[in-house]
Image (cartoon, rainbow, N blue to C red):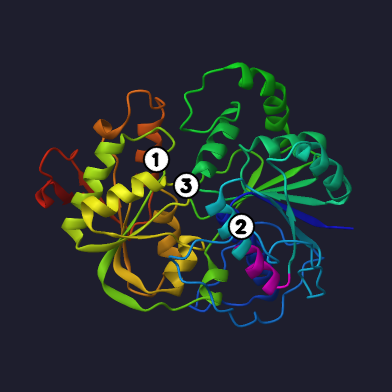
Amino acid sequence: MTGQLAFVESPVQLLNVLEWAHAQSLAVGGTTAPDGRGAAIHAPVHPGDQAPPPAAAPRPATPAGTPGPDGGAVGDAPRVTSVPGRGDLTVIVLSPTDPMSSGQLRRMAQLARDDGFSVHWQEARGARGSLARTLRELAPLLRAAERVIVGDPFSRYVQLLLTLFAPKRLTVVDDGTATMEYAAQLARGERLVRWHRRGSRGPRELVLAPVTAAARRKLAPTSRRTVEIFTSLPVEPPPGTTVTENTFAWTRSRFGPPRITKGADLVGTSLVETGVVDPDQYAAVVAELARAHGATRYFAHRREATEKLHRIAVETGLEIVRPDLPLELIARRGPIGRTVVSFPSTVVHTLPLALAGTGVKVAVCEIAPEWLKENASPRAQGFLAGVAGTAAHEVDRLTAQAAQAAPSPQRLEFG
């Protein structure tokens, strides 16, 4: 019988499942993180949890700029291990169709196996009949699970699974800044809609409306179900939920400390791909930031389009890096710039935790209203401003005017 079941669809989700499991073991064993800080746990500890043995030495990692393979033995059949404290957690990877996401996920799956977890790679998309096959194969595990851990409460796949099999205990881990919106919508009793969507009710939305409505109930606490949010983000606990702080203790214990370079690194965003930010404005501001901070590298988001990245490389001279793991692990492994500049995203909350004690400075560049596309969601500006405004106090805040024909570093100033 599987006591705990985790569904992940992105590399960051799997990373945060590992962080959650590590935090649980720290709560039981009282172990202190390498930088001297204990995990701040506010969730109940259950009798069956045990502290794990010391983590194995990290395996050699593929260089950050190497694209991940979308196949091979890394993520195929489940491999059950008998490591104490790991055996009752099974990770189900609902395979994405995007090759970059799939490549990063396979590497994260191997890290999870190296730490003693059972990982099952489920080809859940693409092929005809994959949905029905997935439901048939996962039904016994879902029925037996005491706790289900999910990384994306907005996922239609996850919503359908939770509608069919409601767990007694539910944990939601971070998959980007969507956790903030999930907590806010849960508290307000609203239907679950991603912040960058305009909220139009097209034919597809109408068909899926019953699933979304049912999932909203399954993702909320009741007298028979507990809900925990495991997050590094500033989240106000919705009524009846428990919030557990993610301090990235597993990441710090597993990697680093990194070698620090003299220059700066920029962190890319998929705001152009999601239809929020105008591509010309984005390219101009990236060039401006690179000149102002002397940046040499641009860490691409896994969803950024190749054409956009090529344009940035040509117009700015930045080296484009396609990370093979989540940025928190890449930064902790190093080398990493002395300053890391990002647009509003999860990393302005997570990198200061992952890089605690290293001396690396993180800065966030706010999104100006004029950068947004005309058809962007009305909620986009307020949400992005909230992400930047709630970043950790040690994160520098940058304001920038929209770049025009001749961008100038003087347009950038610390806020």
Q: Are marks 1 and 2 in contact (CB under 8 Å)?
A: no
N-terminal of the two: label 1 or label 2? 2
Q: Please give the label number shown on residue 271.
A: 1
Residue 373, quarter of the rendered image:
top left
The structure residue drawn at horizontal position 61% and vertical position 45%, both measured from the top left corner, is: 97
The picture places residue 398, in percent across and down from the top left corner, at: 24, 50
The number of numbered discs placed on residues in the rendered structure image is 3
**Mark 3 or mark 1, which is nearer to you?**
3
Q: CA distance from mark 1 to mark 2?
A: 25 Å
Whether residue 157 is in magenta: the answer is no
Q: Please give the label number shown on residue 70.
A: 2
Q: Please give the label number shown on residue 303.
A: 3
The structure residue drawn at horizontal position 32% and vertical position 73%, both measured from the top left corner, is: 359
Q: Amino acid at mark 2?
A: Asp
N-terminal of the two: label 2 or label 3? 2
The picture places residue 6, in percent across and down from the top left corner, at: 72, 53
